[in-house]
Image: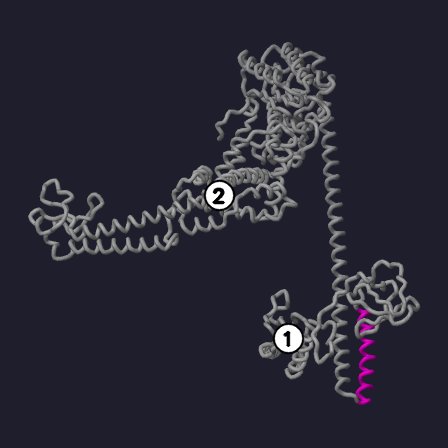
Amino acid sequence: MSTDPLPHAYRVLEFDLVRSRVAEHCETEMGHELAERVTPLFNPKGIEELIAETDEASQLMDTDSVPSLGGLRDVREAARRAAKGGTLDGVSLYRIGVSLGVMRSLRTVLRGKSDGLPRLCAMVEELPEAPKTEARLIESLDGDGEVRDEASPALAKARQAKKQAASRMLDRIQSYVSGKTREWLSDAVYTTREGRYVVPVKSEHRAKVRGIVHDSSASGHTVYIEPDDVVQLGNALRQAEGAEKAEIARILDELSSRVGADGDAIAHGVHKCGEIDFIFAKARYGHAVNGCIPKITGGHHLRIVEGRHPLLDPSIAVPLFIHLCDGHDGLLITGPNTGGKTVSIKTVGLFVLMAQCGMMLPAREVDLGPFTQVWADIGDEQSLQQSLSTFSGHIRNIANALQQLVPGGLVLLDEVGAGTDPAEGSALAKAILLSIQESGGKVMASTHYGELKIFAYNTPGFVNAAMEFDLKSLRPSYRLIMGAPGASHALRIAERYGLPKAVLDRARDTAGTQHQEVSAMLERLEEAQKQAQRAQGQYDKIAHRLKQVEAEAERKLAEAKEAKAKARAHAAETIEDTLRELRLEANEIFETLKKDRRPEAFDQARSKLKRLQERGGSSAKGLKPEPMLEKAAAEVHKGDRVKITGHTQVGTVLAEPRDGKVQVQMGMIKMSFPASQVERADAEVAVPKAVYRENLGLKKVQSASIELVMIKMRAEEAQEVLDRFLDDSILAGLPNVRLVHGKGEGILRKITHETLRRHRGVRSFREAEPNEGGAGVTIAVLT
């Protein structure tokens, strides 16, 4: 929890607990620190920016996987030290490398989304880009900051030399405890003294082991000797260790220099990531409490729809509906004890503070006209004692607020004027409320004083509100009813808790007829207001449902339009495929005529072309797209270049239009179209043209079918058709084709794959994906 001093109002509203809950959603220590220290802004533009940032983070969380910032560490001080020429330790350098990787991932996710997330994108543009430094740090260091062998060839060589030296020394010292010298030792083990390996030699054999004596036993019976040959090997090991340390120091110095080149930028980037982390923490907190983004409007007011106190269990918290200072200066809440007045006041205060920090609010909808200050005097409503000292404390808090209040400031008062004589307290409360109004402030207060209820009713700028009380169960419902004062229900509550009837009757007699009539009137007014609120609630639900139905209807209409457009596009594509097949057959007829000039061949060709034309006309009628709205027929004449609705090709008008029909030559095919579907192709219109290959000086066809269906063909027939189809497709310049051979016994599939393997015009082929037809289809890529 934050230890920074908070204003009195923030403390009594328990704003520090809200900050801590937001901080729990931070992933970095920098973000956590910002969350624990955040205080509200009172500048409307600044507040709008904060809320817009949180809104962007919330949107991104709804649509993308946001990279974790958990690996980011506070390396700002280390980066600045490196920038000044200092050498960093391995742990600091590794953390900087990881932090650079986190910043890179964040920048990658947000880059290119400036249209929808301009503020977050602007923030990540301030993050450093140092991919080479990042890679060098990560490959050179491990998580414990130890320098890896891969950091440099010299380090790997030094460590290998050190390993070999250590191995030789251990082998040699081991030979003393396991060889012929074993009997000279007091124990068959070796140990260390002052970092040197020694063997425990019996005193009487001391002369037999040449070396340096490092220690002796307390009894003097054993001396610890480092043999001369072990000394030499140990020196070699120390030398290897020295070389390793020197290379490590050089590497750390080199890495620190790399970091130092971008040190200030890295420090700034880490700070900026802390701010981004805090923004995302506010969004995560908002999602966790099922919160909303507050809408900022003009003026100084607050409207809450289904708001819940941020620190209460949402499963038991009663939603709050309130319009504070909406067209007035003050709201006076009355009602029974333990009825929820204090909770309502605290909810309002926390919502204002949270919203003006850019936080999401646990409510369905919130409109805020930012306030310029927040003051609060909230006592312990559970206390049964209100002494003079307590009254003095309240007055001191209120006096501070009145002395420093500026226009647009919000003052929250719980049980205003309580703790003293009712007559004096009521008069003082009126004066306080009027003073706040005259200073341009806004006030929300609670009270039990009947005179204040009348005051709020009769004074311009003030309005009453009541905490609902169920007269049947004699329990508070904790719901706020706007527009009507509430009765205290003291006698009814006393009756519920078992106060004797005689005492209650005497109290009613003492209260007097006028007081009882006023209480009864307030109860009736409260019940009427409750019924009106229920009616309003039903209306709001119906209106909300109507909006949902309208939105659903608009969505379905849009889907229907999209489906219609897709159907038309599909129909046009089907027509084009059919025409390609017809053109291909026509081209085959013409190529046959090139080879066979006999009269009989010409007669056969004419007959085939006639049947082909009839077939084309029939296919066009059957595949005609859904008719569109009729449009005025364009004036076209013989020889004009025209475009046909639903077709991509440009054709030529063969004759003057007649009976609303236009005869058009499209490639090899002559067809008639309604005049309403024909329009002149202007010179500016770019007509898509396919690039075709030449074959013996003849163009093949403008386009060809990209699919061949061989199902139910005999093997010989399929082979012949497949060869011709591949040749024609290659000549037509198709990039790929779809071969439908089916699954069956796999004979056609085998023929297809063998043909594709040997055909020079096939670059590659593959089995179709499940959504493309699966094992019954092969996709071939042509050269």
User: Which amino acid lies under the numbered mark 1 shown in the image of this protein?
Assistant: His
Q: Which residues are magenta?
A: 598-622
- At 10% from the left and 53% from the top, the residue drawn is 183
Say above or below: 450 vs 347. Answer: above
User: Which amino acid lies under the numbered mark 2 shown in the image of this protein?
Assistant: Asp
Where does the image place residue 525, in percent across and percent down from the top left? 73, 23
Colour mode of the rendering:
one colour
How far apart are the two marked residues, 1 and 2, measured between alpha carbons? 62 Å
* Residue 748 in sight here: yes
Q: Mark 2: few, some, or many residues within 10 Å (few <14, many ≥20)?
A: some
Q: Is residue 646 rendered magenta in the image?
A: no
Nearest the camera: 186 or 100? 100
Where does the image place residue 555, in percent across and percent down from the top left? 73, 50
Say above or below: 434 vs 112. Answer: above
Nearest the camera: 82 or 564? 82
Q: Quadrant of residue 486?
A: top right
Q: Which mark is residue 26?
A: none
Q: Secondary structure at mark 1?
A: loop
Mark 1 and mark 2 lie on one chain; the one further toward the N terminus is 2
Q: Which residue is mark 1?
A: 741
Where does the image place residue 316, in percent across and percent down from the top left? 59, 34
Q: Quadrant of residue 531?
A: top right
Q: Which residue is mark 2?
A: 262
Q: Is residue 615 rendered magenta in the image?
A: yes
Q: Is residue 357 left or right of residue 617?
A: left
Nearest the camera: 618 or 651? 651
Q: Is residue 181 left or right of residue 380?
A: left
* Residue 57 in sight here: no
